[in-house]
Amino acid sequence: MADKIIEAKDVSKWYGTFRVLTDINLTVGKGERIVICGPSGSGKSTLIRCFNRLEAHQEGEIIVNGIRLHNRMRNVAEVRKHVGMVFQQFNLFPHMTVLMNCMVGPMWIKGVPEAAARKTALRFLERVRIPEQANKYPVRLSGGQQQRVAIARSLCMEPAVMLFDEPTSSLDPEMVAEVLETMTSLARDGMTMVCVTHEMGFARAVADRVLFMDSGRIVEEGKPQDFFTNPRHERTKLFLSQILSH
Ligand SMILES: Nc1ncnc2c1ncn2[C@@H]1O[C@H](COP(=O)(O)OP(=O)(O)OP(=O)(O)O)[C@@H](O)[C@H]1O
């Protein structure tokens, strides 16, 4: 297994003529927890979506768990076996129970037999502390519970890395804590994580490194203690002052 789970070298991406990512260099080691923050439109989502090939980059190199992502890839699904992703909207299948939501990935993508998929699903629903919701449909669950199901569903694929794209930003305030708690507990268990989030308390508590993106570039990065106490870049200072004053 690779020590470097994600390697991005000189990565650039355009939407038409608009350059959304410019010369991104980032290495995520096994067990590392990275938080990416930055203003709206700075390219944070686009960057992490490139890591599971939901978006294609045009220049540079991205290697995820030893798989090089490129335009001639025969099997994009291959990389998604290694990369779990949790979105702002939970994206659960509404016509399937919570348990089935967690079982279909392993069964359909990895060919895991039904009984084994059920066992794994129940294990991860326990892990996110909602095993009692297994037979309900997503619509019966609160937003926080649905997001924890989305996390369990990703974990069932036993990914090498979990990507989180603002997982708490569509939740009512009282449900943010339960999702952050789940993410913190995953981090404490050694899960490799890349999290786009503006939850700076989480970043301080959990991140090994915090990255600040602006206009498609990583303009600052550091350990949380340095990043928050002594940001170097003017844009980072401004961003932190705005976000921490809320
Ligand atoms: N499919 C697309 N086609 C064209 N432009 C896009 C597309 N997706 C995103 N963009 C543009 O690319 C830029 C970066 O978007 P992205 O969603 O990656 O930023 P972000 O930092 O995650 O922002 P936010 O915090 O608001 O989610 C924005 O200007 C956005 O409008």
Image: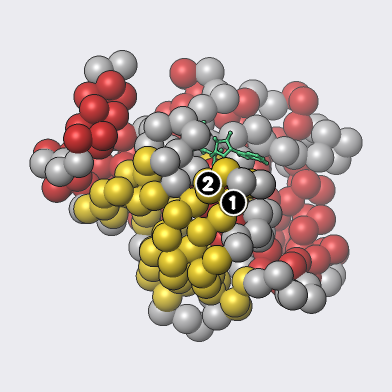
Lower sequence index among marks 2 and 1: 1
Which amino acid lies under the numbered mark 1 shown in the image of this protein? Answer: Trp
Q: Return the residue found at the far front.
A: 17
Instruction: Between residue 137 and residue 211, name the one nearer to us.
Output: 211
The residue under the point 42% across, 60% down is 23
- The residue pinned by badge 1 equals 14
Is ligand 1 less than 8 Å from the beta carbon at label 2?
A: yes
Q: Secondary structure at mark 2?
A: strand
- Residue bearing the label numbered 2: 20
Q: Is residue 185 left or right of residue 106?
A: left
Indicate the amino acid at tag 2.
Val
The quarter of the picture where residue 112 lies is: bottom right
**Which residue does the image show at 53% across and 48% down from the upper left?**
19
Q: Judge whether 122 appears above or below 87 on screen.
A: below
Name which quarter of the figure residue 116 lies in: bottom right
Q: In front: 148, or 66?
A: 66
SS category of the residue bearing label 1: strand
* Residue 14 horizontal/vertical position (percent): 59, 51
